[in-house]
């Protein structure tokens, strides 16, 4: 089979636009479509889409001429159309729905900065995007043109980073950082780079997908001054991979920026192992490494996009072993309530005994692996890496149990609840050390 050519498309209404304009990101941004009248010049809208577009309090709609051109005008179920054109389903309420499903606000020590994990922080640098995904997990803050971060807020974010030495990885997100004014973007990157303990800067952006013309040589030359910079893009369906995106990805990777892809598992868009296989194959062809496949968040407006979690596991089952390891993302559920990303995968470990594990492969072939009889664990006392390990107090979790920093993780009030018998001395069932789930501090055994 011959290699599929990546398409390059322009909807007929844009056919007379001169190339200099079409390829100018400022022109694309200023000509974004958002009203029924504008969109209907490209394709006829369904009744449901029209009613959604007329609703008050609708999450912002804006689509670049480039991206809307990728929609098949004849197909109301087009996978790109569903990502950017609202339908009435978006207005529906569903059980479990939240506005801030990842509890990011609770993890914000200063406005716009989310510090959820020990060594990395997310910086929300803008509320603006090149186009707006209907399932946006940050629709509570994104899209409002009057709600921008102020200078003072950027200073607070930078101060927090300077004063938090365990952060070694800063992720610029938003909104879309690549929609920032070029000078402000460079200033932010340069100021973060000045902080001694920040090792890597990451950018999360859908601009290469919505507005690939923004990836100019000037932009990549600027970013290359502040290496190491990594970037995650956001492609959900193979139809989004065009000649223009391939060129943008080529410019970024040539500038030394490794590219990953984060996609969201969306009903009716990419909840199909064949679509996902095509997607990951096309991504590696343009040198983008699939990174995460996200379970859709419990965010208002996204109910109709949700799939059962089992769909994601089925997709990974259909990828692992069947195709290049490089092409396989990690399927994650970002836990509601701020639990963070939880990876899920098919089970390959069927059973285990003292000296043997029983495994199955992607074809269902079942085999055993003989465990070593004489394994000597490495010595923490002589290992210089162990001695210099970064402080993660309170966030060790299960790893804390494995490494001996705690014996149990106990829900709050668990001890009190289980002290039902007066006859048994407390010491017999109170662990030596334990981690309280609420504040993650060791609690001392209580003596009645
Ligand atoms: C996803 C995320 C990160 C980065 O997680 P990685 O697994 O390192 O890619 C950091 N902070 C927050 C709040 C996140 O949601």
Image: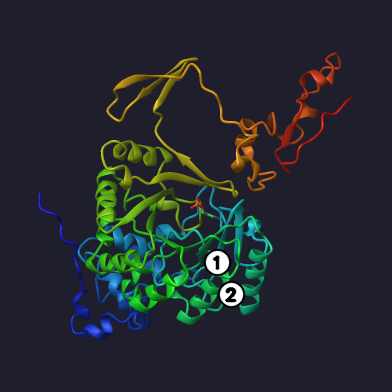
122, above or below 24, in the image: above
Q: Give the mark count.
A: 2
**Residue 358: assigned label:** none
Q: Is residue 155 left or right of residue 143?
A: right
Observer-nearest of 257 and 38 = 257
What residue is shown at x 32% (from left), y 20% (from top)? Answer: 366
- Circle 1 crowding by C-alpha within 10 Å: few under 14, some 14–19, many from 20: many
246, above or below 150, in the image: above
What residue is shown at x 48% (from left), y 16% (from top)? Answer: 373
Whether residue 50 is visible: no
- Circle 2 crowding by C-alpha within 10 Å: few under 14, some 14–19, many from 20: some
Q: Does the numbered disc 1 mark a residue whose Cβ is under 8 Å from ligand 1?
A: no
> Please, which colouring scheme is shown?
rainbow
**Residue 124: assigned label:** 1
Element type where label 1 sits in the image: strand
Residue 223 percent location from the top left of the image: 43, 71
What residue is shown at x 28% (from left), y 73% (from top)? Answer: 66
The quadrant in which the C terminus is found is top right
Q: Are marks 2 and 1 in contact (CB under 8 Å)?
A: yes
Residue 320 percent location from the top left of the image: 32, 38
The numbered mark, 2 or 1, whose residue comes first in the sequence reads 1
Q: Is residue 81 left or right of residue 444?
A: left
Residue bearing mark 2 = 149
Residue 324 percent location from the top left of the image: 28, 43
């Amino acid at each position: 089979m011959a290699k599929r050519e990546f398409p390059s498309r322009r909807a007929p209404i844009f056919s007379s636009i001169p190339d200099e304009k079409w390829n100018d990101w400022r022109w694309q941004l200023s000509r974004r479509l958002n009203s029924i009248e504008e969109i209907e010049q490209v394709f006829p809208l369904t009744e449901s889409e029209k009613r959604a577009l007329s609703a008050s309090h609708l999450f912002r709609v804006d689509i670049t001429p480039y991206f809307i051109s990728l929609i098949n005008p004849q197909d109301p179920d087009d996978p790109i159309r569903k990502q950017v054109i609202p339908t009435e389903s978006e207005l529906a309420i569903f059980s479990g729905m939240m506005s801030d499903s990842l509890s990011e606000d609770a993890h914000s020590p200063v406005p716009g900065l989310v510090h959820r994990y020990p060594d990395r922080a997310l910086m929300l640098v803008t509320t603006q995007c090149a186009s707006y995904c209907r399932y946006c997990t940050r629709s509570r803050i994104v899209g409002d043109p009057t709600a921008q971060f102020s200078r003072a807020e950027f200073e607070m974010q930078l101060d927090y980073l300077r004063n938090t030495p365990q952060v070694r990885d800063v992720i610029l997100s938003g909104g879309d950082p690549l929609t920032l004014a070029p000078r402000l973007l460079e200033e932010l990157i340069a100021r973060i780079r000045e902080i001694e303990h920040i090792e890597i800067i990451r950018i999360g952006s859908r601009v290469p997908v919505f507005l690939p013309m923004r990836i100019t040589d000037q932009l990549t030359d600027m970013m290359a001054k502040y290496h190491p910079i990594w970037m995650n893009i956001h492609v959900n369906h193979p139809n989004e991979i065009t000649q223009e995106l391939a060129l943008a990805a080529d410019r970024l990777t040539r500038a030394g920026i490794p590219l990953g892809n984060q996609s969201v598992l969306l009903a009716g868009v990419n909840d199909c192992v064949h679509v996902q296989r095509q997607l990951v194959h096309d991504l590696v062809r343009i040198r983008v490494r699939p990174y995460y496949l996200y379970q859709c968040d419990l965010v208002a407006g996204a109910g109709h996009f949700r799939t059962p979690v089992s769909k994601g596991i089925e997709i990974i089952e259909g990828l692992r072993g069947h195709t290049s390891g490089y092409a396989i993302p990690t399927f994650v559920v970002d836990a509601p309530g701020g639990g963070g990303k939880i990876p899920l995968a098919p089970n390959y470990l069927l059973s285990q005994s003292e000296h043997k594990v029983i495994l199955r492969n992607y074809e269902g072939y079942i085999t055993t692996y003989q465990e070593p009889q004489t394994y000597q664990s490495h010595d923490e006392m002589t290992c210089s890496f162990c001695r210099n390990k970064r402080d993660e107090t309170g966030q060790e979790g299960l790893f804390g149990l494995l490494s001996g920093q705690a014996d149990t993780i106990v829900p709050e009030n668990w001890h009190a609840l289980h002290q039902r018998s007066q006859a048994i001395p407390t010491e017999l069932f109170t662990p030596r050390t334990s981690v309280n789930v609420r504040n993650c501090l060791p609690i001392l055994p209580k003596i009645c």
